[in-house]
């Protein structure tokens, strides 16, 4: 009776392990797909960066909103619309992350990473 219980317990563990690995395989992203989507994201960042900087190598803090609009993280403001407090705080926090040395500008590599 003990041997039978032990075998059933082992079979149950094996079944759980097999189910876990099968679900993991279904959710796994192919490396080729991951690389493809990362390249798409890099292209979008580069296009938004170049549009916001007019082709210059550095993005000024004043152009951050243009970058975010170009990257489609933010909607463009309507005529005379004022940025609300939450948006301002989020932009300020993002800028502190992008420009930790407080130079007033950041480059494409920093934006991508």
Image (cartoon, helix red, strand yellow):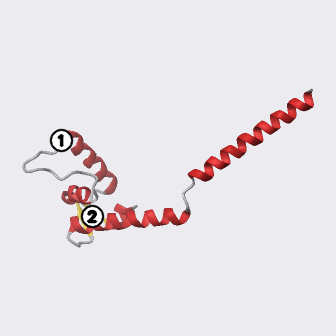
Locate the N terminus and report the quarter of the image it occupies: top right
Q: Most extreme residue toward the top, as rendered?
A: 1
Q: Which numbered marker is on residue 48? A: 2
Crowd around label 1: few <14 · some 14–19 · many ≥20 (10 Å): few
Element type at marker 1? loop
Where is residue 69 drawn, in percent x and y? Answer: 23, 56
Query: Residue, x 89% and y 31% (percent of image)?
Result: 4
Give the side of residue 111 with respect to residue 67, left or right.
right
Q: Is residue 100 visible?
A: no
Locate the C terminus and report the quarter of the image it occupies: bottom left
Element type at marker 2? helix
Query: Residue, x 22% and y 67% (percent of image)?
Result: 51
Where is residue 45 drawn, in percent x and y? Answer: 33, 63
Judging depth in this view, the residue of 47 and 105 nearest the camera is 47
Q: Is residue 2 above or below residue 53?
A: above
Query: Residue, x 67% and y 48% (percent of image)?
Result: 21
Where is residue 110 drawn, in percent x and y? Answer: 36, 62
Q: Which numbered marker is on residue 5? A: none
Judging depth in this view, the residue of 53 and 41 nearest the camera is 41
How many numbered marks are there?
2
Question: Toward which corner of the image does residue 68 lie, by quadrant?
Answer: bottom left
Crowd around label 2: few <14 · some 14–19 · many ≥20 (10 Å): some
Give the side of residue 78 with respect to residue 38, left or right.
left
Where is residue 53 drawn, in percent x and y? Answer: 22, 67
Q: Is residue 52 visible?
A: yes
> Badges 1 and 2: C-beta atoms under 8 Å apart?
no
Task: Compare marks 1 and 2 and give the one earlier in the sequence.
Answer: 2
Q: CA distance from mark 1 to mark 2?
A: 23 Å
Q: Which residue is mark 1?
A: 84
């Amino acid at each position: 009776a003990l041997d039978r219980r032990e075998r059933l317990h082992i079979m149950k563990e094996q079944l759980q392990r097999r189910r876990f690995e099968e679900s993991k395989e279904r959710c796994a992203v192919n490396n080729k797909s991951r690389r493809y989507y990362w390249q798409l994201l890099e292209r979008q960042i580069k296009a938004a960066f170049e549009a916001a900087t007019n082709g210059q190598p550095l993005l000024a803090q004043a152009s951050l909103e243009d970058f975010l609009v170009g990257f489609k993280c933010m909607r463009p403001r309507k005529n005379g619309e004022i940025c609300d407090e939450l948006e301002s705080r989020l932009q300020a926090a993002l800028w502190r992350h992008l420009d930790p040395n407080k130079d007033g500008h950041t480059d494409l590599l920093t934006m991508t990473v």
